Amino acid sequence: MARVRYGARTEAEITASRTAGAKLPDIWSTGVVAVWETDPDAVAAVLPPPLKPTARPLVRVNISKVDLPGHPLGAGSFAVAAAHEAVEGWYPLVMPMTHERALTGGREVFGEPKKLGEVVVERDGLVVRASMARHGIAFVEVRGAVSGPLPLPEPARKTDFYFKFLPAVDGSGFDGDPVLVYCERDEKARRLERVTGDVVLRESLYDPVADLPVRHLVEITVGEKTSTQRGRVVERVDARALLPYVHQRYDDPRQILDAPPEDGGA
């Protein structure tokens, strides 16, 4: 009988796949990063417990083109600064990806809030433009001009916080206890430049990042980096406390019933 590819894989095939995944070469990405201060109350409002705000109400947007062999990947992240106990890091609200495979690797395994979208990074001489779009709306756009080189940072470890959970089959709560995940990334850069420009946030029903406006732009950079990552579960979390934030993860048609932002979103 011909091989049935949806059938069970052999132990040797599973081992070979795991071994190959552990030996991947450095994968470099070209990315635009923007950091700004926003309203402290807005940051506090989007953080599920047990995460808490840090001393500065920072937002970080990372928009990258990843040099995957044969299949370049557009990868974006919109995150706020957060802390868990003594650890400070970032809590992503939305992470658009241009490939379905990138969703599975992060959403199901780590609990990352990844969604299919359009991610663009363009450079024409000194002019730089990067954007993240979904449902026809470029809800984040970073644009500017390169104004000079920056010293390469030392290799560093950065932490992202994720919540891994499965919505219940009956539509109420979760199937199993949700967990808080630390995703620890070891990053190194081979190029970094300063960008003078601005950040545009556009109103979007499904990606309401405009609720975290740019109050003070800290920096915009463009560069090339590579990273390795590992995830670990640090604790189980209170399902009742997390449940009001589940809409951050999924496109929910019922969002049309939400009240509009106060003061027109200003």
Image (cartoon, rainbow, N blue to C red):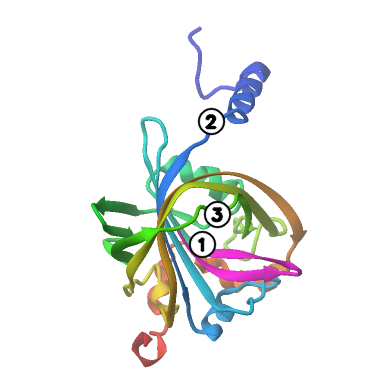
Q: Position of residue 172 (x, y in %)?
A: 61, 65
Residues at circles 2 and 3 in contact by the CB criterion of under 8 Å? no
Residue carrying label 2:
25
Name which residue type carries label 2. Pro
Residue at the far top: name it: 1
Quadrant containing the C terminus is bottom left
Q: Which mark is residue 153?
A: 3
* Majority secondary structure in the magenta region: strand
Q: Residues within 10 Å of mark 1 (few under 14, many from 20)?
A: some
Tell which circle, 3 or 1, labels the residue nearer the N-terminal end.
3
Alpha-carbon span between mark 3 and mark 1: 32 Å
Q: Position of residue 263 (x, y in %)?
A: 37, 92
Q: Nearer the viewer, mark 3 or mark 1?
A: 3
Name which residue type carries label 1. Arg
Q: How many marks?
A: 3
Residue carrying label 1:
249
**Tag 2 secondary structure:** loop
Name which residue type carries label 3. Pro
Q: What range is drawn magenta here?
A: 77-92
Please give left or right for residue 117 compared with residue 242 in the image. left
- Give me the residue at 77% from left, 59% from top: 235
